[in-house]
Amino acid sequence: MEQIRYFAPLERSLDQMRALLFRPFALRRWLLFALAAWLADLPGGSQGRILEQLHGGTSDAVAAPLVGLTGVLPALGSGTSWGTLIGGISAIFITLLVLAGIVLAVVLLWVNSRAKFVWIENVWHGECAIREPWRRFQRQGNSFFWWRLGLGLLFLVAIGMLVVGVELSGLAAGFGGGGLGDSSLFPLVGLVLAALPLGVVAAYCLFWVEAFVLPLMIRHNTDFVGGLRHFWELLRQHPGSFLMVGLMALGIKICAALVVLVLIVVSLGIGLLLLILPFVGTLCLLPVVMTVRAYPLQWLAHFDPAFALTAPTEPV
């Protein structure tokens, strides 16, 4: 195996991006690549945003029907004011909206999970297609979706238990000490201190899954568990290298963000208006998005030459 490098894969990723987007420039190619990239990072598509949507709607979805029924039934049975009746109906309507939001979030998570494999295939092999890789990687996409959904629900349960534990500790300290003094801050401080290393571990795990596990699932035509198994073999043999490449990828994203910030300032804020528009922002940032996606693939070529990126030989 060749010496593991971190900047050479970035240079090859930039070459791949230029070959796919600018040699030659074709609007149709840009639009298709941007569509694949946008679907692979839908609003609410990443794990953190999906979890926030589910977390924000779960408790309301359980409680609001009861609130609505307790408002409607007395109004219907005892002839109370129309305000109570309208309030109950409004609560039920809000409940239906919350449930619809949860369903939409799950659908977006499924589309996002399937589209990630389409985007990887587009960047990896220089393809410019949506439907064919969408069908070809159905098994991998569905497997990834179910694991994300299950782990997300477990995460919500764990966060809920932590919050309840901290609140109970604070109440106990308040009742025991005659008020909420400094002792009530101990559980919160402990939670923050524990969250810091856990946050670093979680960030690395999310990066490794996106950057390496999904491509390995494509390479070995396996499900999510199989991709994890192949990645674990690599991680066990080269732990330091996989830690370093995570820092390198973070540095690339920070540099890209700084460049985008400079462009926004130079354009007097017009660039920001374009970037916040759905799909238009992805289209404008397509060279950056493609380079960021190509980098871990090029880096994986250290261990498997099949991951070396290939640009198309004919323009589309």
Image: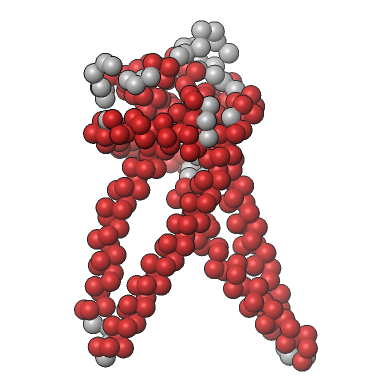
The structure residue drawn at horizontal position 74% and vertical position 83%, both measured from the top left corner, is 73
Res. 266 visible in picture? no
Q: Relative to the observer, which residue lies in front, 161 or 19?
A: 161
Of 10 and 170, nearer the camera is 170
Instruction: Find residue 93 and report its horizontal and vertical position in percent.
Output: 69, 68
Q: How is the image coloured?
A: secondary structure
Residue at figure coordinates x 49%, y 53% from the top left:
152
Q: Position of residue 52 (x, y in %)?
A: 48, 56
Q: Nearer the viewer, residue 208 or 235?
A: 235
Q: Is 46 above or below relative to 93? A: above
| Residue 121 located left or right of residue 302 | right
**Rendered view: 220 above or below 147:** above
Instruction: Establish if 136 lies above or below 184.
Output: above
Split into 4 quadrants, where in the image is the N terminus? top left
User: Which quadrant is the C terminus positioned in?
Assistant: top right
Q: Classify residue 14 as left or right of residue 237.
A: right
Q: In this rendering, would 45 be left or right of 92?
A: left
* Vertical arrangement, residue 310 with respect to residue 233, above or below: above
Whole-percent x, y for residue 270 in the image? 44, 39
The location of residue 122, given as percent across then percent down, is 52, 23
